Image (cartoon, coloured by chain):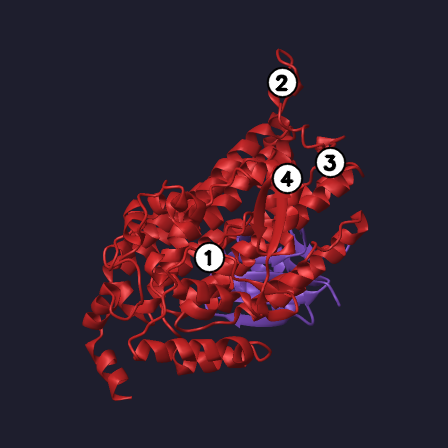
Amino acid sequence: MTVKKLGLRQRYEHMTRGLDWETTYQKMDDVFPYDSFEGIKIKDWSAWEDPFRLTMDTYWKFQAEKERKLYAVLDAFAQNNGQTNLSDGRYVNVVKLFLTGISPEEYQAHRGFAFTGRHLRGAGARVAAQMQSLDELRHLQTQVHTISHYNKFFDGIGEFPHMHDRVWYLSVPKSFFDDARSAGPFEFMIAIGFAFEYLLTNLLFVPFMSGAAYNGDMSTVTFGFSAQSDESRHMTLGIEVIKFLLEQHPDNLPIVQKWVDKWFWRGHRLLGLVAMMMDYMLPKKVMSWKEAWDIYFVEAGGSLFQDLERYGLKMPKYADIATEEAEHISHQNWAVFYQYTHAAAFHTWMPDKEHLDWLSAKYPNTFDKYYRPRWELWAEMEKEGKRFYNMALPQLCQTCQIPMAYTEPGDPATICFRATQFQGETYHFCSDGCKDIFDGEPEKYVQAWMPVQQIFQGNCGGPTVLDVLAWYNLNAGADNMDYTGSPDEKIWKEWHPDADAARKAV
Amino acid sequence: MAQVASITLLQNDDARPIIEAILADNPGVRVLNMHGAVKLDCDHSITIKRASVEERLGRAWEPQEIQLVLVSMAGNLDEDDDHFTLSWRH
């Protein structure tokens, strides 16, 4: 007798839903206590679609293959001193920001998907969330392994978990994931699975990782694209979640729309860090943030929302403002970090002339008018020995926790301020988007751990900058300040004495 | 504006037969070469046929193997034993 091989659909059916059962010793509502309080109505979990039809056995096979390929590259990179072949020593600062600001969020995503994988009632959704939880843990581990090689030579890397919990700008990604993980399982799926994975991670992992390849960072591009192969599955999960919720019950639409609006805006604010990495921190540029935004949000997001219109779902609120901000956000963020370089665990610099010209060409509507003159003034002040540091602690937005440095829609010369009164206190916001999010759940956001307020309350090591940096485990004089004059620059010049001489000759 | 179906693959030897199969089977496909990756865009729908990949690869190939070289995609996915299709059609 010949054994007939099961097709993809049948194998999937047997290996996921076929293994599920209705509990009888305990009530299903007691086993899954968290899937109703958010107000989402599910009539039929079996309607869940799983386009990848990936089963656990196949998952392990593919993931093992990806890991073998990745670790072969990491070994080769270390053995061949790949760090000396980067485009420039400045490049390493993107790796530092990645490890301190993004890798810990992979771990948060791992925890969040483990929770949703346990608490959603449908077997298809549970299996997909379980795989994503394992993926996210793999991403953290591979990122730590990759970047640990840089830690042998460069500053600002070794204390990343400690810094993640304490440093002012790292509270931006931390609070984003704290917000998602303290939500219910459906909101988490929309926040991370849909808004973050589908709409926004392409912007992080595709052009940015292509930038790593262009800048000679063979190891980062390899972990980046290895992670991104998982992301395609995550994006598919995200789009399935949203379609499933909208198909299940019309009452779900306003709830889902509110989450989409909220998490789109939060994601847009968070990715401002990536905008700055792409426009300012990659020595060799691949594309501008604005170009990446147009491809991955305006075009790809536009196609998606056109598709979701049939369920009544609209483009996220303030998507037009976010697109307008794509011409400003990298410049405004870099200005913040330049002014506060003494309190950052990576190095900053003013762009050289070639870089300024690239920015002028990529941002014809905004750069020459609003930013280039400021950069040229700051460069001039540096030359005169009056490098500008901002020693005042900034006011922070209560929602995104970013210093209030963004400008009014339609008026890039005026800082945008919004405020709300709640229980006798005034709370401040950088934008209408962030204010709306607070107003939707004020009881949640008044509890936010605000880095500047905590310093003023005496909870961060002491009253001086050096006290706070010590509390951050930030090695002042090595981890912080400008690239010029840093130990990073010194080691880079030791590896490349000829390049340094050539630069001086020009 | 036409809805764009899109797939991004690694620029390496494992992905090359798949990229070639896409170029052959999807008239009007647009190619964006990046460092380390290639983005292939097509209005409405883009498909990878198992037979076309096997022809170029010279061995049996399952559409699920695409996961080893996949970077990103856009569109609703329909995957089965003989094809991997992204589309905005219903």
Instruction: Give the mark, 2 or 3, whose residue is nearer the N terminus.
Output: 2
Marks 1 and 4, how far apart at CA: 37 Å
Colour-to-chain, red: A
Q: Name the residue type under label 3.
A: Ala
The image position of residue A393, as x and y in percent, is 42, 55
Quarter of image, res A414: bottom right
Judge by depth and name the residue closer to the eye, B17 or A225. A225
Q: Name the residue type under label 4.
A: Glu
Provide the secondary structure element on which disc 1 rests: helix
Colour-to-chain, purple: B
Marks 3 and 4, how far apart at CA: 32 Å
Q: Name the residue type under label 1.
A: Phe
The verdict on a common chain for dots 2 and 3 is: yes
Q: Name the residue under label 1.
A: A225
Residue at the limit of the structure toward the bottom, as seen here: A506
Q: In this view, does A286 lie to the left or right of A48?
A: left
The verdict on a common chain for dots 1 and 4 is: yes
Subunit under mark 2: A
Q: Are marks 1 and 3 in contact (CB under 8 Å)?
A: no
Subunit under mark 3: A
Q: Residue at x 73, y 36 (%)?
A: A47
Q: Name the residue under label 2.
A: A30
Subunit under mark 1: A
Q: Mark 4 points at which residue?
A: A441
Instruction: Give the mark, 2 or 1, whose residue is nearer the N terminus.
Output: 2
Which dot, 2 or 4, sits closer to the camera?
4
